């Protein structure tokens, strides 16, 4: 009885969070500009309600649950909820509401600042947000440094020292690498109007498994995937009329996120049984489709056919080897989301260092633009011409998502390990990919990743699925098997 009450309560929180997600999707896509102040308030009201339900009320309901009498799944769920509750109880409702409101305002000003290369416009909001996040870290508590308390939101139990240990050898190996020679011809570089690109993207992601009866795709300034519910996932993309790749690979990335959300269990909503495990697992799914599958030669053969079929005006006799070369050309560049699979991790390393120093109060918001440029030039050997191409490029900090970036690299390392495992498991993996038969991959991911929900830690899911703990070497092996260095 009390278990039923718990599940009903969690489902109520789930629906409230759904409403909030829908408001945030609207803010990023169609909301009129001047609605932003009220939107921040609306989201603040919901955050306040959710906070109350998942602390005060949840604590009362959990008191009556006889945890030792429960069957395994129920017990795992209740244990996770108890862990969450202890964490949530440490954050005062006032702080939770303030963070939601300030980040909503900060995103609005970040968007303006980015468009106008105006870091000082954004700086006061970012400073406010950083101090609120430091307060949050102090409420949560930590062993080594405040930043670790925030990392834990996105990857349970991960410490910055663990991440440093994993990323360091990768950075050392990949530092200022470049692949052999710049491709002579780039088939993606031609003028294709926005509407035609979007129509193509909408057809193409269905071939990958995206279901338009349970989701949609729109345009936004920063591509994202937002799961409103298990049967409604919104993804967005952005378009350069002279470069189809710019849109296509961000769309494939977000589709990977969407496939994960749409493949989660659709019972016991709002419980860890039906929730995504962590951002690391989330990013492993998006990057698996974007990179491991999406930049492989068999996929390029499939893509070449689809370009000819869906965009006959622009593509005929597409050479898949040319696509492969273009998609795997490695060259340091300024924008993380457009960077290649290799230099990507240098982008992450520098963001990780900066946000860690910010939260640990070793640097201030005012220092960011100069430090950013210095690190970009150290790691990548290039210098941003302005802040729009530098410190203002990513949405994360404006949304208060400090501690998020490391999950991108970890996700890539997970994805490489999953990809190599699948290749050994299915001898015809490449042939099926070339044909565009992805059903067996969906099936395997559903059984081994999606259906596990959040009942286990990410590293447990990876180990159960691939038979091995995380090995960053898998990523290095995967990369060096397909890319030739200068
Ligand atoms: Co992503």
Image (tube, rainbow, N blue to C red):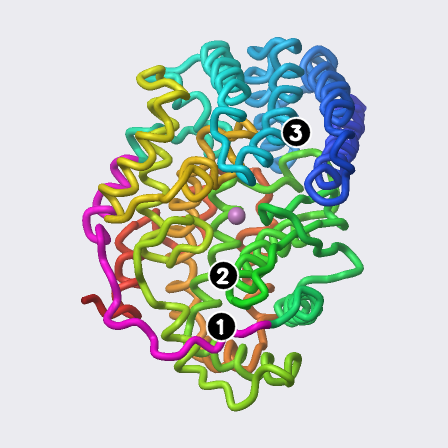
Q: Mark 3 points at which residue?
A: 70
Question: From what the image shows, is residue 408 above or below residue 438?
Answer: above
User: Which residue is rendered at x = 61% and y = 68% of the image?
Assistant: 208
Describe the element under mark 2 as helix, strand or loop.
Answer: helix
Disc 1 to disc 3: CB gap under 8 Å: no
Q: Earlier in the sequence, mark 1 or mark 3?
A: 3
Query: Gap in Å between the C-alphas at discs 3 and 2?
Result: 40 Å
Q: Measured from the top left, where is residue 104 in percent x and y?
A: 65, 26
Q: Which of marks 2 and 1 is nearer the N terminus?
A: 1
Q: Which of marks 2 and 1 is in front?
A: 1
Question: From what the image shows, is residue 173 above or below residue 404?
Answer: below
Describe the element under mark 3 as helix, strand or loop.
Answer: loop
Res 417 visible = yes
Q: Mark 1 points at which residue?
A: 189
User: Which residue is rendered at x = 35% and y = 17% of the image?
Assistant: 360
Q: Nearer the viewer, residue 427 or 303?
A: 303
Left or right of 391, for residue 63: right
Query: Gap in Å between the C-alphas at discs 2 and 1?
Result: 19 Å
Quick one: quadrant of the C terminus?
Answer: bottom left
Q: Earlier in the sequence, mark 3 or mark 2?
A: 3
Quick one: quadrant of the N terminus?
Answer: top right
Q: Mark 2 points at which residue?
A: 290
Disc 3 to disc 2: CB gap under 8 Å: no
User: Which residue is rendered at x = 48% and y = 78% of the image?
Assistant: 187
Give the magenta part as a residue range: 164-191
Left or right of 423, for residue 12: right
Q: Nearer the viewer, residue 427 or 402?
A: 402
Left or right of 398, for residue 324: left
Prevailing secondary structure of the magenta residues: loop
């Amino acid at each position: 009885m009390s278990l039923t009450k718990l599940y009903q309560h969690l489902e109520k929180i789930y629906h409230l969070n759904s409403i909030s997600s829908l408001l945030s999707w609207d803010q990023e896509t169609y909301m009129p500009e001047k609605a932003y102040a009220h939107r921040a308030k609306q989201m603040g009201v919901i955050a306040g309600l959710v906070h109350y339900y998942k602390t005060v009320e949840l604590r009362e309901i959990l008191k009556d649950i006889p945890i030792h009498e429960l069957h395994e799944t129920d017990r795992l769920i209740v244990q996770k909820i108890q862990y969450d509750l202890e964490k949530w109880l440490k954050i005062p409702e006032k702080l939770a509401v303030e963070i939601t409101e300030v980040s909503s305002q900060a995103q609005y000003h970040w968007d303006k600042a980015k468009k106008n290369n105006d870091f000082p416009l954004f700086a006061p909001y970012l400073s406010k947000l950083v101090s609120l996040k430091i307060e949050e870290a102090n409420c949560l508590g930590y062993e080594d440094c405040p930043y670790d308390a925030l990392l834990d939101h996105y990857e349970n139990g991960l410490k910055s020292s663990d991440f440093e240990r994993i990323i360091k050898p990768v950075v050392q190996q990949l530092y200022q690498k470049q692949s052999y020679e710049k491709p002579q011809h780039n088939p993606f570089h031609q003028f294709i109007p926005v509407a035609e690109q979007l129509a193509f993207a909408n057809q193409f992601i269905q071939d990958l498994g995206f279901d338009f009866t349970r989701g949609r795709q729109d345009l936004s300034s920063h591509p994202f995937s937002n799961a409103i519910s298990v049967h409604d996932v919104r993804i967005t993309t952005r378009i350069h009329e002279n470069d189809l790749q710019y849109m296509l690979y961000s769309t494939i990335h977000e589709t990977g996120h969407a496939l994960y959300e749409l493949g989660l269990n659709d019972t016991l909503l709002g419980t860890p049984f039906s929730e995504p495990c962590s951002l690391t697992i989330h990013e492993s799914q998006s990057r698996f489709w974007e990179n491991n599958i999406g930049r492989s030669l068999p996929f390029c053969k499939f893509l070449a056919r689809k370009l000819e079929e869906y965009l006959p005006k622009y593509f005929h006799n597409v050479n898949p080897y040319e696509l492969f070369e273009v998609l795997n050309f490695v060259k340091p560049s300024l924008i993380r989301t457009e960077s290649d699979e290799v230099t990507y991790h240098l982008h992450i390393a520098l963001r990780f260092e900066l946000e860690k120093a910010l939260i640990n109060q070793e640097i201030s918001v005012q220092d960011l633009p100069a430090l950013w440029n210095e690190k970009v030039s150290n790691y990548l050997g290039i210098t941003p011409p302005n802040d729009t191409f530098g410190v203002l490029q990513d949405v994360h900090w404006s949304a208060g998502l400090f501690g998020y970036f490391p999950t991108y690299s970890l996700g890539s390392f997970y994805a490489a390990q999953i990809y190599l495992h699948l290749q050994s498991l299915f001898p015809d993996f490449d042939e099926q990919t070339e044909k565009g038969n992805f059903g067996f991959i969906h099936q395997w991911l559903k059984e081994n990743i999606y259906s596990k929900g959040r009942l286990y830690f990410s590293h447990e899911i990876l180990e159960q699925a691939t038979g091995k703990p995380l090995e960053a070497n898998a990523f290095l092996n995967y990369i060096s098997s397909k890319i030739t260095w200068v």
